[in-house]
């Protein structure tokens, strides 16, 4: 179980009811499709589950978590009410950013005697600071991603389809230890590359095409994320220039990044380079985001982000330029912020690659 002191410091409630799979995974450290986790102050927690997870939940029992088993005959809300009464809980934090309107309505109607307080933002805040174990998982996920990239460079050639590239990249991630994907792989070649989040198609990669690959692995539930644009054959003069502008923008972002900066500062380090080269209106998304169990977590690095980027947080740095009819380039690295500086976890080559 994760330590929950920080969450109670932020949320000022008596208990937090965790219902979503990802937050249950975050706090308990294992995946389950059903269960109610009640966090209580002082790291005294209760896990309500059914027989499918009772055995797995014994891991939590060993850590001092109260494991309550319910079956078809008992209702989870009755079990919750019992827990709240037993521990004299008056205010219950709930995941306002995860519950459906129906789930919330149900809780509001059935959990009489307690006040429900939204704590979704507090949970996101707590999740944004990674433990050493989480950092190790994310580093491993990123190293799998880097290996897959080096493998794709060995086989990428004209005549392959975007789908072929997708399948090969995903195979290489699985082969090198990924348990799954962090998100749907993006492969965008030629004119498709001007669409930042294009899905892979049957389009055949032709000589001179840029190929943007945005992909990530999942390891122990944690995501990685990287993007490279490579060229299959000589790019046009304009695309060559665009590549160098994006690379310079990203380099400026990474080199100027520091612990304690605002998200919008990182964004502006990159955006200013793109602006001064005349491509401002073609940089259509923000510079970066954090990740963890989710591929997009707080903090973010957008033009308006006031999030402070602090030690033990991750942020991507991924400027891009997308010119319709010409093509696009994006370069994305994953950064770990620490007191004494920034570590770029993405080791793959960034100087222009022409296959
Ligand atoms: Mn990303």
Image: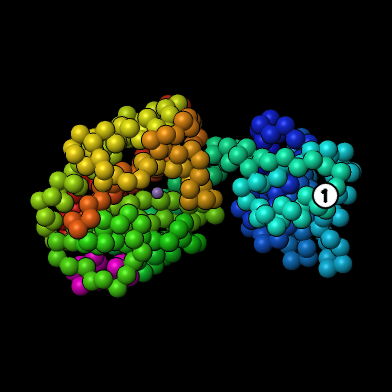
Q: Position of residue 130 (x, y in %)?
A: 54, 39
Q: Is residue 244 left or right of residue 343?
A: left
In the picture, which quadrant includes the N terminus? top right
Q: Quadrant of residue 102?
A: bottom right
**Residue lying at 69% horizontally and 34% vertically, measured from the top left:** 11
Instruction: Please check the rendered image and state whether residue 198 is part of the magenta-colored stretch, yes or no.
Output: no
Query: At numbered mark 1, what does the secondary structure look like: helix, strand or loop?
Result: loop
Mark 1 Cα-neighbour bin, 10 Å: few <14, some 14–19, many ≥20:
some
Q: Position of residue 155 (x, y in %)?
A: 24, 66
* Residue 183 is at least partly visible in this image: yes
Q: Nearer the viewer, residue 282 or 167?
A: 282
Q: Total number of numbered labels?
A: 1
In the picture, which quadrant includes the C terminus? bottom left
Q: Is residue 157 left or right of residue 164?
A: left
**Residue lying at 58% horizontally and 41% vertically, measured from the top left:** 124
- What residue is disc 1 on? 111
Identify the magenta region: 154-165
**Residue lying at 28% horizontally and 39% vertically, measured from the top left:** 250
* Residue 144 is at least partly visible in this image: no
The answer to whether residue 7 is above or below residue 327 is above
Q: Nearer the viewer, residue 96 or 182?
A: 96
The answer to whether residue 338 is above or below residue 245 is above
**Residue lying at 43% horizontally and 29% vertically, measured from the top left:** 262
């Amino acid at each position: 179980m994760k330590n929950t002191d920080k969450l109670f410091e932020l949320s000022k409630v008596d208990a937090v009811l965790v219902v979503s799979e990802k937050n249950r995974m975050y706090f308990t450290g294992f995946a389950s499709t059903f269960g109610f986790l009640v966090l209580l102050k002082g790291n005294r927690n209760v896990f309500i589950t059914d027989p499918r997870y009772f055995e797995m939940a014994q891991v939590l029992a060993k850590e001092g978590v109260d494991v309550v088993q319910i079956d078809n005959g008992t209702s989870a809300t009755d079990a919750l009410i019992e827990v709240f009464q037993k521990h004299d809980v008056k205010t219950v934090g709930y995941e306002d950013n995860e519950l459906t309107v129906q789930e919330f309505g149900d809780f509001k109607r059935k959990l009489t005697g307690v006040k429900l307080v939204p704590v979704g933002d507090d949970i996101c805040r707590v999740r944004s600071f990674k433990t050493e174990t989480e950092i190790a998982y994310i580093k491993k996920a990123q190293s799998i991603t880097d290996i897959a990239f080096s493998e794709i460079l060995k086989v990428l050639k004209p005549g392959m389809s975007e789908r072929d590239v997708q399948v090969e990249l995903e195979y290489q991630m699985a082969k090198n230890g990924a348990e799954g994907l962090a998100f749907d792989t993006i492969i965008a070649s030629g004119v498709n590359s001007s669409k930042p989040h294009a899905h892979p198609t049957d389009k055949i990669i032709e000589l001179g095409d840029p190929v943007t690959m945005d992909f990530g692995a999942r390891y122990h539930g944690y995501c990685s994320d990287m993007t490279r644009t490579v060229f299959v054959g000589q790019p046009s003069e304009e695309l060559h220039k665009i590549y160098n502008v994006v690379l310079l923008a990203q380099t400026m972002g990474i080199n100027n990044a520091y612990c304690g900066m605002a998200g919008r500062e990182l964004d502006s380090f990159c955006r200013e380079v793109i602006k001064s080269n005349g491509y401002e209106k073609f940089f259509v998304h923000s510079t970066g985001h954090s990740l963890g169990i989710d591929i997009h977590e707080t903090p973010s690095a957008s033009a308006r982000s006031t999030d402070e980027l602090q030690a033990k947080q991750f942020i991507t740095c991924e400027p891009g330029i997308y010119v319709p009819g010409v093509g696009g380039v994006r370069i994305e690295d994953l950064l770990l912020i620490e007191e004494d500086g920034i570590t770029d976890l993405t080791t793959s080559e960034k100087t222009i690659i022409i296959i």
